[in-house]
């Protein structure tokens, strides 16, 4: 059992894998509250405290017709940890609406304001996950959302198809949110029912040179253009191709509907989940020459 020299800071606990029990003081961040900072006829700045549940905050915004977060409906976790991961789903990332966050510097007790630029957001990462990891506790996050003329992003994934299934031709932000919820519930297990941390691996982003070699060998593989020099390949597809989708190894397994999700069927240890993850990484690398890395935080 690892012994930590300092307290362990816990948010919602949804995006981590504990490989073993930890022997230290655990501080759970449970700050509550939502407030309007300022608004115009077209936009609103809204601040949420760190302990608010992310999905409930998204629903609050939708109920008040504040647009921008609807594609990220049903993402597990709390608002305070959302900037750390730069959470995202269906073509939208936190950084798209992020304005700033307040963070307690653990070493000094000072509250520091981080702007979007200072957070150095990247794909599922930020300064809080890289160069300043473990130095801050985010206490609140401020977003800029639309009040009218919402920009709807429906082309990514199955949103457009789900809207068509729902017979919706002119969707509202609630329609998009409902579609996302339906899609996620059909693919992803409820962590309250079946233990999981959501998407375990990040979708790898590769250079154009690596992609061209990959695409020549696997012309039917799905991909997304990130930039003129980078391409994103769905990790779930890679994992499924090497035969892990739906596989179970005692109580550790890969979900039957979404190969990105590693699940605990009841009594798997954190280390057993981690060993399964390592096997998947090795098989994908051997078969495709592409490295997939965890999206979840591995502790310790």
Image (cartoon, rainbow, N blue to C red):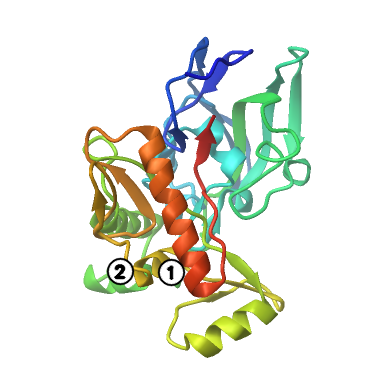
Residue 174 on image: x %, y % = 35, 54
Identify the image quadrant of residue 244.
bottom left
Q: Residue 78, labelled with which disc?
A: none
- Above or below, 167 against 33 in this view is below
**Residue annotated with mark 2:** 163
First in sequence: mark 1 vs mark 2: 2
**Residue annotated with mark 1:** 238
Residue 11 on image: x %, y % = 49, 26
- Above or below, 22 against 298 in this view is above
* Label 2 residue SS: helix
Q: Nearer the viewer, residue 50 or 57?
A: 50
Q: Quadrant of the C terminus?
A: top right
Report the Cα–Cα distance between label 1 and label 2: 28 Å
Residue depth check, mark 1 versus mark 2: number of the one nearer the observer: 1
Q: Nearer the viewer, residue 250 or 172?
A: 250
Residue 219 on image: x %, y % = 47, 88
Residues packed near mark 1 inside 10 Å, few (<14), some (14 to 19) or many (20 plus): many
Q: Is residue 207 visible?
A: yes
* Label 1 residue SS: helix
């Amino acid at each position: 059992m690892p012994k930590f020299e300092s307290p362990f800071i816990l948010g919602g606990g949804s995006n981590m894998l504990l490989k073993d029990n930890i022997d230290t003081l655990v501080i759970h961040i449970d700050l509550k509250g939502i407030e309007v900072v300022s608004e115009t006829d077209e936009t609103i700045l809204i601040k949420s405290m760190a302990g608010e549940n992310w999905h409930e905050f998204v629903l609050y915004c939708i109920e008040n017709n504040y647009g921008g977060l609807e594609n990220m409906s049903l993402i597990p976790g709390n608002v305070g940890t959302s900037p750390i991961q730069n959470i995202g789903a269906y073509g939208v990332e936190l950084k798209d609406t992020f304005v700033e966050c307040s963070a307690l510097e653990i070493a000094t007790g000072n509250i520091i304001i981080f702007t979007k630029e200072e957070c150095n957001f990247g794909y599922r990462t930020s300064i809080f996950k890289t160069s300043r990891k473990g130095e801050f506790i985010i206490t609140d996050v401020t977003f800029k959302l639309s009040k009218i003329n919402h920009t709807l992003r429906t082309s990514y994934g199955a949103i457009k198809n789900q809207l068509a299934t729902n017979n919706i031709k002119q969707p509202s932000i609630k329609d998009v949110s409902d579609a996302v919820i339906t899609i996620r519930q059909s693919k992803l297990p409820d962590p309250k029912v079946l233990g999981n941390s959501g998407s375990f691996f990040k979708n790898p982003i590769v250079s154009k040179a690596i992609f061209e070699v990959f695409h020549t060998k696997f012309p039917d593989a799905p991909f997304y253009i990130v930039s003129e020099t980078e391409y994103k390949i769905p990790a779930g597809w890679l994992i499924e191709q090497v035969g892990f989708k739906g596989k179970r190894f005692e109580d550790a397994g890969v979900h039957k509907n979404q190969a990105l999700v590693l699940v605990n069927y009841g009594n798997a240890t954190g280390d057993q989940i981690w060993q399964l993850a390592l096997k998947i990484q090795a098989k994908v690398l051997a078969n495709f020459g592409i490295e997939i890395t965890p999206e979840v935080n591995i502790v310790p």
